[in-house]
Image: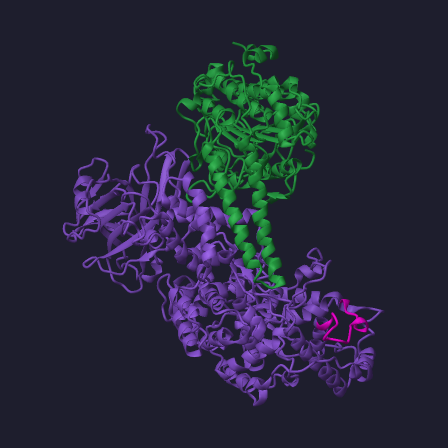
Chain colours: A purple, B green
Amino acid sequence: MKNWILPALFVLWNMDAIAASTGSETPGTLQAAKELGRQKSRFLKGNATSVQAAEGPLSANRADFEKVVGPLLTQSCVGCHGPKKAEGKIRLDQLNPDLLNGPDAERWRKVYNALNKEEMPPEDSTDYKPTAADRANVVQWLGEELRKAAVAHRTSKDHSSFRRLTKYEYEYALEDLLGFKVSFASKLPPETVSEDGFKNRSDLLQISAMQFQSYREIALQALKRATVRGERPEPVTYVVAMSEQMPKLAALKSSKVFEKDDPKSKTFNEQHLWNRQTGQMILPAPVAVAPQNKVAFGQNPPVSPEVWALPQSAQMILNLDRFLPDDGVMRIRIRAGRSTMNPNEYASLRLSLSAHTSNNANFSQVVSARDLPVTASIENPQFIEFDVPLSDIQRNPFRKQTTPFPRRDEFLRIQNIANSAANVAAGEERLKVLIDYVEITAPHYEQWPPKTHTDIFFESKNKGNEQIYGREVLGRFLRRVWRRPAEPSELDAFMGFFAKVRPSVESFEDAMVEVLSTALASPEFLYLTTRQTAEGAKSHQNRISDLEFASRLSVFLWSSIPDEELLQLAEKGKLREPTTLAAQVRRMLEDPRSKRFSRQFADQWLGLDRINNVNHLKNEDLRAAMLEEPVAFFDEVLRQNASVMDFLDSDYAMLNERLAAHYGIGTPKVYGPHFRRVPLSPRSNRGGVLTNAAALTINSDGKDSHPVKRGVWLLQRVLHDPPPPPPPNVPEVDLTDPRILKMTLKERIENHRNQAACASCHSRIDPWGIAFENFDALGAYRTSVNNQPVDATSDLFSRQRLAGIDGLKHYLLTERQDQFAQAMVQKLMAYALGRPLTLGDSPDIEKLTAQLRQKNDRLGDLVHLIVGSDLFQSLD
Amino acid sequence: MTPNSLLLSRRTFLRGTGLALDLPWFETFARAAGTRNDTPKRFLSVYHPDGVGLPLKSDPAWEDWSWFPRGGEKDFVLTKVLDVLEPLRSEITVYSGLSHPASRNVHGHSNGDVYLTGAAIPGEGVYKNSISVDQLYAEQVGELTRHASLVMSTNGGTGAPRGAQTQSFNREGRPIPAMNKPRQIFEMLFVTSSKEAAARLARSKSALDLLIENTRSLKRQLSKRDQETLEHYLDAVRDTEVKLTKAQKWIDMPVPRVDTSNLHLDAEPKEARLYFQTMYELIYLAFLSDSTRVATFQLGRENGEGPHDLLSLAVGLPGAHGLTHAVKKPGGWQNLGTYNRYQAEEFGRFVQKLKDTKEPSGNGNMLDNTFAMHGSASSSFHLSRNYPIISAGGKNLGFKNGRYLKFGKGNEDNQAGAGIVSDVGWTGKMQVEELPLSNLFVTVLQRLGVETDSFGGFTGTLSRV
């Protein structure tokens, strides 16, 4: 059965809310608009929460249709939407007036919206204009019939939350299960994205044989990596102390040595060795280091005056020759400090591995997961540690050859990633990172066997008996993988498989790895189940089990499987006790895993993925910063339990140095790559997510802003009121026409809109987008385009004037708060359930929106409301 | 030594390396695999590094030693470099004006890696390759044969990033190690029957049985609608089972018996002629026995050094790579041309052999059902443009041969970048128009039966092919 995507239905039970919007208020501050808009909320006026699904049998009201509504439609609408014209492909004369049982409820909803917002009949067709009373009659009848239809659809099973884990959920689940990031899981195909942006929609998550095979391969490979056999391997360890390197290099003929007073030494912008006591400097070539036998890793020798100095972007290059092992983790400890402590300057370290095997055959790859900041002074330096999984990175393929050519060596590069020179006054000394000591070891294990191994093959008195111990290992593993205890018969089946495998492999562990990897390809790991239990069916509870609820909860807030605490509470049947549940949700939101929720939801809600396909964005730092801003902002609103209205406008932003520079925000100064909360002045033109560079950039056309895309984005993503898709054969704007070529962008759009075929949709889209015209294709603020002043004013269909971004925000805050609040509930609920919402869900959405508004629109509270709602607990 | 004396007559050749497949086996095979009515479609790509000779028209060597033919589509004249292919004229197509757009300003020596992938890899720094055209086809037909593909090179292994020693890359863009020892290749094809593979297969089958059973018990507890969703999972498991069953057939079937008395399985690249011919012979045998339908073969590596650069010894010339640097020395163009001529000659010998062998299913000869291409990712000195490409065969796939197909605009006489021996050439701005080589790959893939309209980020086929 067809699923409906349900656009904002907030007008459904209250038809006079919008009609009041005439825009007559004098614009004050946005804060004042927020307060004013809140006062207008219908949800805060007395009886709003009493919306309940009516009990008892429902029937369509045909009598009123035949008597009143039908004749009115014939008189006012069928002229254009009937057998003669069928404008917009809508034939009102053919719609089935039985909304409960007929197939046209969704079409009627559109009719209802058009009439209720007074978009139809159009302004200029005075012949058809109905009286206010006639319009109210039709609207009232339709509103009631739609409400009944919603209730009727609520009980029909045309949707389900039973679905496969998404690619990212699968990756996180493996990570939480096995204790390390399984990088090769990325070979799974990407998910289909729904029209409203979500990747976790039950009806779109498919599976193919190729994908199934990938699951099996990934699981086998991951379990092999998690577990070990035999004795601890002897690590290869390098110790690089500058106190030893400096005299050695000074003696080399190829080194350039400068003494303290040499004027040239002052101007070094390259890496160099430096004796902080004597002032001697050496410009070195890459330093070849050899592994040392039996050397202890994790030393902390006295700080030496000899240091390796790294100005911005400079690298320390260590030639590690060909001795790094193939597998395991390489741990690198770097003792580093800053040469100056100017708070305007920021420095961090990044690692790369490179090789130059022969002419034109070279590579260099960043191997550190992220840049780590250097904050200590060189007088009191810090150790900075990196872990690099050696089997995941590009290695020199010739490293094991017996002949020296092609070259077999591998280079570790330690680079200083710092902020721009503009932060230092002229003549002032620039920050360098100083390194006096480096240790490298591989493979590195904190313990032997490693924790990833003992988590699976734990200590047991039964270790000597493969059958008994195997069953123990399997039982514990299956409980986490399936998020429920396994039945004895299921254990039998898997142990039967063990018995078949065991003779063909070397060790007990090898056989178990085969068995456990099969569990990781089983449906109960890959899918979120919604079992129909016999008791549930009897009691008509329609609720998922406690254990399935634990999974739904953890996938919602952690994008992963539940942890031990959630499982135990669910097994005891306590998880859904209100105080326990509230405490668990708080705990989950405090856990770092909840960052995944912020990342995934913000990313999907706003469509941020598209930033990776934007060609006009060349700067990778800016791209990364753009991508992070809305995520950090959502995270901030969530953690502060702030109002969702902050998404429309806020007096703060989440910024890093790169983005603050892009926005021209100079005070307060923002330094470094990490995101933090920055207060905004009222004239900053920022605040909320509408003006995030990412949103503005993805809705540009590569050269300039794209008001139509921006308008559609606002309607679809923010207001949850998507316009219909463009019809086939849309006439393109004809740029060969010299008249059109001369026009400004806004004029072109208006010209396009004036064409009859385009007007009906574009008059509802374009004005929203034009309000963003002060932002260019990368979201930077501008006051002129091509030497002409920017014109960002436009009139909505309702003749409401929007004056630029502030005007737009004013309007949304004063007139559309209810709609936006409801949109947020819709989006979060659709994400939480992993299925499209349908007409039948609207009473619940309505109720939750009222509760949200009564709780001052707080996002954190909304998460609690959703988790506690009937919808989130129900089977379908 | 004149170039013509290098030509062995066909009869000499057949006597020289003659081998025989055990034909009764062949019929058994055809019956078992059910392929009698299903003629295999094969793909081969041979890659040679360092490009070809491209003298300026004003150079006296132009007439004889410029690699590209002269003249039009049908009336083209092969120069001395390719005249060894004259007897096969109606079976080959020569192309000009094709290259990978992302590589056009990358040094020719860094480009062998992307010849079959078209990946956008810059000249240095981060390196991320993508699937090669042969492997894309192997994904589709790999399970029909014992080996999904045969990946060979003279150097073997993967080589380094930007210095590949293999032409084949998997879906994740990782290099597939090439085999370079004839004996190993032979044993893989015709001797080994893997116990470990059989055990692995048995494990997989038991695992699938277990999962199906496990899924059924879950299914009973779901709503009707959710059961349908779960059915998709079961379909995926069952499809995998079908694949395993096909693989089982190969494991159970005895390897084809081949008479090795005339095969020089211990030939080394230093013995260029023998080695070269043995490698081609192995491809021929692999195709004939339908052990695989996909093969790649890389001669040497870009910027070649060491023993593998000595294939040119076959025509009495020193290091092959050095020939491209010495074209302005006396006899330079001729030397490079002579070496390229030798490569074409060996390719031609292989093509002729396919042509002379009846397709076991009876559908024409083997060449008619094989698309074999031969080329390089650079033309003139380090210049990653206007790739010199020859293809042969594929009549039954829809290829019309006997043509010289010029693509692009502004370089009809192949003079852009000609005669250059400095790096000004490859760094210089592109002045003429060329078409993406990926367009040819899309055409080839479609004719091999792969449903795709794009490759390596480029959509569309090549017209006229």
Q: Does residue A839 belong to the magenta stretch?
A: no
B186 to A697, vertically: above or below? above
Q: Quadrant of residue B445?
A: top right
> Could you tell me if residue A700 is visible in this image?
yes
A769 to B199, vertically: above or below? below
| Residue B117 position within the rendered picture, expressed as x and y whole percent measured from the top left | 53, 39
B47 to A8, vertically: above or below? above
- Could you say which is closer to the camera, residue A708 or residue A167? A167
| Residue B239 position within the rendered picture, expressed as x and y whole percent measured from the top left | 59, 45
- Could you say which is closer to the camera, residue B133 or residue A575? A575
Q: Quadrant of residue A94?
A: bottom right
Q: Residue at x 58, y 52 (%)?
A: B234
Q: Which residues are magenta?
A: A89-105
Question: What is the tally of numbered marks visible in this picture?
Answer: 0
Apparent side of residue A601 relative to residue B395 in the rendered image (left or right): left
| Residue B361 position within the rendered picture, expressed as x and y whole percent measured from the top left | 68, 26
> Could you tell me if residue B127 is visible in this image?
no
A367 to A852, vertically: above or below? above
**Please, which residue is most extreme toward the bottom here?**
A46
Q: Does residue A101 belong to the magenta stretch?
A: yes
Q: Quadrant of the C terminus of chain B?
A: top right
| Residue A598 position within the rendered picture, expressed as x and y whole percent measured from the top left | 45, 66
Main secondary-structure element of the magenta-colored stretch: loop
Q: Quadrant of residue A60?
A: bottom right
Apparent side of residue B393 relative to residue A342 in the rendered image (left or right): right
- Could you say which is closer to the camera, residue A424 or residue B305? B305
